[in-house]
Image (cartoon, coloured by chain):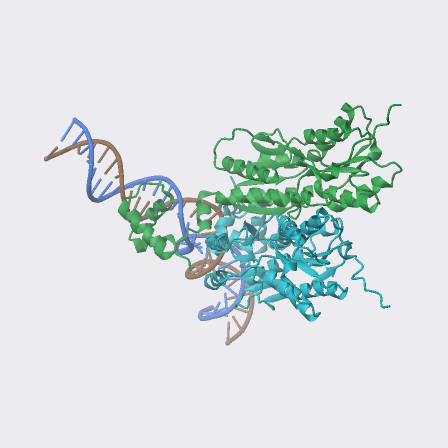
Chain colours: A green, B cyan, C blue, D brown
Amino acid sequence: MDATIGQVAKKAGVSKATVSRVLNDSKPVSKDTRLKVLEAIKELNFKPNPAARSLVSKKSRTIGVVVTDIANLFVSVLVKGIEEIAHSSGYNIFICNSHGSPEKEIDLLMMLKDKRVDGIIFLTSNLLKEHKSFFAISYLPAALVNVSCNQNRLIGIRIDNYRAAFDMTSYFLEKGYTRVGMIRGSLADQYTGRDRFVGYWDALDKHGIVYDEELVKTGSLETIDGYLATKLLLGKNAYPEALFVACDLMAFGAIKAIIDHGLRVPGDIEVAGFDDVPMASYYHPTLTTVRQPIEEMGRLASEKLIRLIEGDDIDRWEVVLPHKIIFRDSTAGKGRVEKPIV
Amino acid sequence: MDATIGQVAKKAGVSKATVSRVLNDSKPVSKDTRLKVLEAIKELNFKPNPAARSLVSKKSRTIGVVVTDIANLFVSVLVKGIEEIAHSSGYNIFICNSHGSPEKEIDLLMMLKDKRVDGIIFLTSNLLKEHKSFFAISYLPAALVNVSCNQNRLIGIRIDNYRAAFDMTSYFLEKGYTRVGMIRGSLADQYTGRDRFVGYWDALDKHGIVYDEELVKTGSLETIDGYLATKLLLGKNAYPEALFVACDLMAFGAIKAIIDHGLRVPGDIEVAGFDDVPMASYYHPTLTTVRQPIEEMGRLASEKLIRLIEGDDIDRWEVVLPHKIIFRDSTAGKGRVEKPIV
DNA sequence: TGACAGCGGGAAACCGGTTTCCTATAATTA
DNA sequence: TAATTATAGGAAACCGGTTTCCCGCTGTCA
């Protein structure tokens, strides 16, 4: 069906080797022969068989991508960035959903290695020692998104989650609120989740507010988790004046819960999220949030990984991209009303 | 680095052919030899090289997936379904974003063919004759999502968009509203977009309402398009009592526009969407919408395509899955207030 | 006992490219 | 003019599997 290099060679009256040289510019070929070969290629509509190429080059031109769940907005935007660069560099991407399970993650990493991918982009909120040793032993080029790792030859792409959470929380505190709550990610998250939580805590601390565990609940990053966690929070007798939520999806759930509880956002409780997914500016009320350059993170991970795969040198292994707080309606409250001094 | 079949053969004291037979159960092997081979495989941690296998089998175990934009919620949920089945059947998926451009779509289809994918899943709202002839000429197994095509040997997965739109619109009309508007998809969409629009029109017709082009605007399926289209609609002197929007994302934009305009949903205008993306039940107000079994559509496309690739017979080439209208707050209005008969 | 079928297993061809090694010719230098 | 050096391009090995073809052994039947 498809033409082979042998047929092209015969048609052009040259050897397979010569056709290969024309295809890859791997050795000089005279103008005449080159033209004959190109002509034959065009006439037969010849496309080199990638499997045959892979076999000898030992490169699959495929990047494995392990993510928690492609249907999550953060993830799909990240993948879009990854795909854009990979595709334009001639790489396929091979996406796998781990559903956040560490065992599944390990399985997937090993499976990708068996499939001979050239490199891996790994999105996880929790980098375990099993993960680290996989990368150390396998020698597979890899880029980690969202976590930092001082291990040798591992690319890391993230934002300063600690700082972002610190600043977001400080905004509420400087508005005069003393009861600032948080819906945080799972306690198992040693990186993203932890950094955002510590940033929140440190901001309280710096502003002389004592951490109150009654004001903090945990959810697993889905909208429904934000909803349920906030419901719990509101069950207490004294609810927060402001709420910092560890991701936008949960923040939407939180706002829904507050409204269902008969309170207003931002009138009664101000809410801020994290990520700035596209929906944040169309939710009602629009959501104040920490903007991560998600697509850019994907592009950068892809680009650096491909450089690493192709043996170019990497100037910086760890990249911390800038974030930005985007203020919208969900925090457009008046701040604490000071008691007038008589 | 990685062990080869030759090394396994040597270690087990047999020929490569025998190892291959054990791996694939392609010819009987005595119990003794089989055990020796399995032992050697385990000891060397041997994993067959997929490129070498592909070369001889002429199968890449890869499915090309062409979608408009992976960051779109409908798309990412669909891809999740596709990935689930493909992965569990040992197939990779190779995702490409067309951004809705027909030229790009053709380019991607041809590129996938050159990459020797075993089959293609194609999500498009508009099946052009160039697409059809690609599938006809290339003989590549393919599954189309969202469009119907009477062409031979093409799998089609969709819902009855016409009926769904008809029913949704009828709901408003039967509530007594006479001014029911629509934000429809692009005029270029000959399938999904057209069916939903015709369903809307026919419902009006059946209820004796004359189609009013002032009440219909067009958008390109993104949230912002819904917002802008609705803004336009509200600019007119008499706005609709109810609005049927061709997809959820645009519906969110529409609701936002209505609220920004100083009106209430559903108090002043009722709104319904289409798709039932996860956010629909967490938007404020929660969104009435036509539920498509998106993930199931992905799974089914994947499953049928793999059957086709592997030569099993296909019982039904066209599958029309059931949809369901999910009623939520955005249509919880009282209906037209009848003038009391004195 | 001899002929033949059935079965396990090895050697080698093959898939379609790339790369090494080598040769013939042209160009350069002594 | 002879010797040397570049250069284009061919033959064949190779990548790592699968598959065909064939052979030797055992068991069965006449």
Quadrant where the N terminus of chain A sits is bottom left
- Horizontal and vertical percent for residue B204? 68, 67
Nearest to the observer: residue B254 or residue C18: B254
- Horizontal and vertical percent for residue A18? 32, 47
Nearest to the observer: residue B205 or residue B331: B205
Quadrant where the C terminus of chain A sits is top right
Which residue: 28% across, 53% down? A13
The number of callouts visible is: 0
Which residue: 55% across, 45% down? A83
Relative placement, left or right, of A96 versus B13 is right
- Horizontal and vertical percent for residue D25? 50, 59
Nearest to the observer: residue B280 or residue A129: B280
Residue B314 occupies quadrant? bottom right
- Horizontal and vertical percent for residue A289? 69, 37
Which residue: 82% across, 64% down? B339
As drawn, A217 above or below B277: above
Nearest to the observer: residue B112 or residue A205: A205
- Is residue A117 shown to the viewer in this render? no
- Is residue B57 shown to the viewer in this render? yes
